[in-house]
Image (cartoon, rainbow, N blue to C red):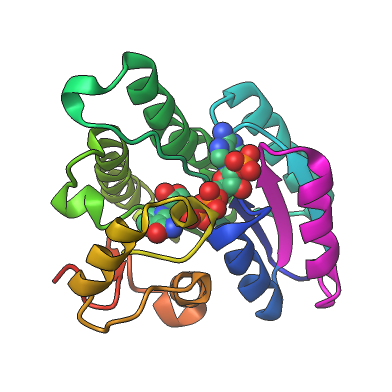
Amino acid sequence: MAKTAIVTGSARGIGKAIAETLAKDGFDIIIIDACPIEASEETAKEIACLGVKTKAYRCDVTNSEEVNKVVEEVKTEFGSVDVLVNNAGITKDGLLVRMKEEDFDAVIAVNLKGTYNFTRAAAPIMMKQRSGRIVSISSIVGIQGNAGQVNYSASKAGIIGLTKSVARELASRGVTCNAIAPGYVETPMTAVLPDKVKEAMLEAIPMKRYGQPSDIANAVAFLVSDRASYITGQVLSVDGGMHM
Ligand code: NDP
């Protein structure tokens, strides 16, 4: 029976690339996104062409009731939850002294609480199975900080702490939990940045190219594969050498 992978925020961007790559590796794919269901269903349809089973859900990762319901349904319909990729994320940038409280809370709610909600829902299933892989998408700014991203970098640093604690709790049950820290990746999230910021980013990347969603997806594919069975609690930077 095929293994099942849940990927949050996968209607587009990095999440979509992760879903496609895992489908190519033979995983059945659950698309989770907060956007109108048509967009997620379109992505699911594209991925189904790769010969795997797919299903799309409209689900807000901040809503624990919705999350629990989706994970239960997936377990019933697909038989197992083998991989969870916590990828859904948002930015609401601004300097600390100008940052609105609601913008701080919103970013923590999606990026960190959303990661907690899905991990909390999937972990008991994986523990019972005595196997599972959890990968959460952090960011290099969660490691080194970034002016204008107090909320975002706090959420991404939080993901690293959560990852290491979950890794320690679940290691003896055959479940690994790791994080990936992307640098600058070309997606709709970064497309809106001013050209000046983009140029400065490129300057700071030793490999002198922006990351592509497939760069992140390939790292996820490795961490959820049998080849990574002895790796847990780690943060893998995928950033062309930006942070080392
Ligand atoms: P995108 O904005 O392109 O995609 C993010 C996806 O998450 C969207 O489909 C979005 O849906 C979904 N999403 C947002 N909020 C929720 C929610 N509450 N519930 C469910 N889904 C939600 O971003 P990227 O692909 O660039 O980023 C993916 C991840 O990688 C994020 O966690 C981001 O922080 C991280 N990252 C990205 C970097 C980059 O340079 N691009 C660098 C470092 C980390 P909707 O269409 O509804 O908004």
Say left or right for 240 vs 1. left
Left or right, residue 3 beside residue 232:
right
- The answer to whether any part of residue 87 appears in the image is no
Nearest the eye: 32 or 96: 96
Q: Is 96 one of the magenta-colored residues?
A: no
Query: Which residue is drawn at the image coordinates 19% and 27% (left, top)?
Result: 96
Viewed as shown, does residue 234 lie left or right of 125? left
- Quarter assignment of residue 94: top left
Using the image as rendered, state which of residue 234 and residue 62 is in the foreground: 62
Asked whether 29 falls inside the magenta stretch, the response is yes
7 vs 170, nearest the viewer:
7
How far across and how far down the image is residue 44, in percent? 80, 59
Q: Where is residue 27 in the image (x, y as percent from the top left)?
A: 69, 70
Tell me where the magenta segment starts and ends, as one range. 28-52
Residue at left offset 47%, top offset 66%: 186
Vertical order, 86 against 14 (above or below)? above
**Percent position (x, y) of residue 23?**
70, 73
Locate the C terminus by quadrant: bottom left
Q: Residue at x 50, y 79 (%)?
A: 226
Position of the N terminus, as image quadrant, is bottom right
Q: Residue 29, position in %: x, y? A: 72, 61
Res 196 → quadrant: bottom left
